[in-house]
Image: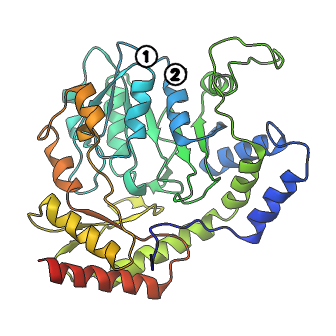
């Protein structure tokens, strides 16, 4: 590939931080774990932070700590990475999908109430592509019906809505640190909450069900090994210290794309919704007009053949074969999600993407659209 879809931004500071841990005896459950959690809680503005080995693990632990399980329903979006649906199934609950807003691509708050039943226990909204648009309205619906909100902020570190940071809307929230995210720990995630009981439960669940002061072989409940080791935490601390620099780099890449693609009416360019400060996770354009899935896929393939790595963020979760069978979903159930999904093109996007590479991406996209129209 001439231009890759994503690349992490690792400096000498991160390398030195990791090497420092490797030279110590504390590779796991050492001092870097607590240091990372405290720094993250301070940055987001929550009372507690609990580091885990992935965003998926974090979502599962949050639902478990909140007591959600078999017989319960959790309302969520079908336009997302599949983990936010998997975690609901993992605790034995039922995902109930609500279609998205056609403009901001997040769950549509105005459609949530129609999906609420006496089995509904929580709403799990996702800040798709880093945007918290509509989350204030989602929380209002949740409060009106006494439902918990588990905020999936895995794509939205550093974003805000009307000055309120992502990670602070829900009773619990989760960030993720896969290498394509704003910051990375290689693999990892961070649970956020102001509730000490929920945080303590997640600490126990991530560490084989151990309790406070119970010793290494004292286990109070069924637990898991979802710990984040000090090597990953050291990398996270160094990355978090650069988060404003990282956000600025990504904003510059997004603005350069916006400027270079402006005026082409064949393309819908992502913009910040009103009141949102987006910490850009990806840059996903959409093909305008009545576009078939085959046409979009042909564009993706043609761009890849020319050395530009692109992707289709996101296929509808409810039409993934396992989900369709498990949840009895079919094409046409969530028409806005399906219509949007068949038009999306995730362009190469990362901190140090050069202006020359962005220009090549845009030139290639326009040429491919010319040749496949």
Q: Nearer the viewer, residue 62 or 278?
A: 62
For residue 125, what is the image quadrant? Answer: top left
Q: Position of residue 4 (x, y in %)?
A: 46, 72
In the image: residue 161, left or right of residue 97: right
Q: Position of residue 103 (x, y in %)?
A: 23, 57
**Measured Cα–Cα span from mark 1 to mark 2:** 7 Å
In the image: residue 326, left or right of residue 70: left
Residue 303: give its label.
none
Residue 33 vs 164, above or below: the answer is: above
Q: What residue occupies the far front of the structure in this picture?
A: 305
Mark 1–mark 2 CB contact (< 8 Å): yes
Q: What residue occupies the far left of the structure in this picture?
A: 290
The quarter in which the C terminus is drawn is bottom left
Q: To which residue does mark 2 refer? A: 64
Query: Which residue is found at the position 14% from the left and 45% from the top?
Result: 335
Tell me if mark 2 has few (under 14), some (14-19) or many (20+) residues whose alpha carbon lies within 10 angstroms of its own.
many
Mark 2: which secondary structure? helix
Q: Position of residue 200 (x, y in %)?
A: 67, 24
Residue 71 vs 42, above or below: the answer is: above
Q: To which residue does mark 1 refer? A: 69
Query: Which residue is found at the position 59% from the left and 68% from the top?
Result: 246
The quarter in which the N terminus is drawn is bottom left
In the image: residue 57, left or right of residue 235: left
């Amino acid at each position: 590939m001439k231009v890759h879809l994503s690349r992490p931004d690792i400096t000498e500071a991160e390398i030195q931080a990791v090497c420092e841990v490797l030279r110590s005896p504390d590779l796991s459950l050492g001092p870097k774990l607590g240091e990372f959690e405290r720094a993250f809680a301070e940055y987001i503005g929550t009372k507690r932070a609990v580091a885990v080995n992935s965003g998926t693990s974090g979502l599962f632990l949050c639902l478990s700590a909140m007591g959600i399980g078999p017989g319960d329903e959790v309302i969520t979006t079908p336009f997302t990475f599949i983990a936010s649906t998997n975690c609901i199934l993992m605790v034995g609950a039922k995902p109930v999908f609500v279609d998205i807003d056609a403009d901001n691509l997040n769950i549509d708050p105005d459609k949530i109430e129609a999906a609420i039943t006496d089995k509904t226990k929580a709403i799990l909204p996702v800040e798709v592509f880093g945007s918290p648009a509509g989350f204030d309205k989602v929380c209002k619906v949740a409060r009106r019906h006494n439902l918990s909100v588990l905020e999936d902020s895995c794509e939205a570190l550093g974003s805000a809505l009307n000055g309120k940071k992502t990670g602070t809307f829900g009773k619990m929230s989760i960030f993720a640190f896969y290498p394509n995210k704003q910051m990375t720990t290689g693999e990892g995630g961070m649970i956020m909450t102001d509730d000490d009981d929920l945080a303590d439960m997640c600490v126990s669940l991530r560490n084989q069900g151990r309790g406070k002061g119970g010793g290494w072989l004292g286990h109070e409940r069924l637990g898991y090994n979802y710990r984040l080791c000090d090597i990953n935490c050291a990398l996270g601390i160094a990355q978090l210290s650069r988060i404003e620099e990282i956000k600025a780099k990504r904003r510059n890449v997004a603005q350069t794309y916006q400027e270079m693609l402006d005026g082409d009416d064949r393309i819908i360019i992502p913009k910040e919704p009103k009141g949102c400060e987006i910490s850009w996770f990806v840059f996903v354009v959409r093909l305008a007009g009545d576009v078939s899935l085959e046409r979009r896929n042909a564009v993706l393939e043609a761009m890849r053949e020319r050395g530009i790595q692109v992707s289709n963020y996101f296929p509808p979760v409810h039409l993934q074969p396992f989900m369709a069978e498990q949840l009895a979903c079919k094409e046409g159930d969530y028409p806005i999600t399906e219509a949007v999904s068949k038009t999306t093109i995730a362009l190469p996007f990362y901190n140090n993407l050069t202006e020359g590479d962005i220009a090549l991406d845009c030139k290639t996209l326009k040429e491919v659209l010319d040749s496949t129209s």
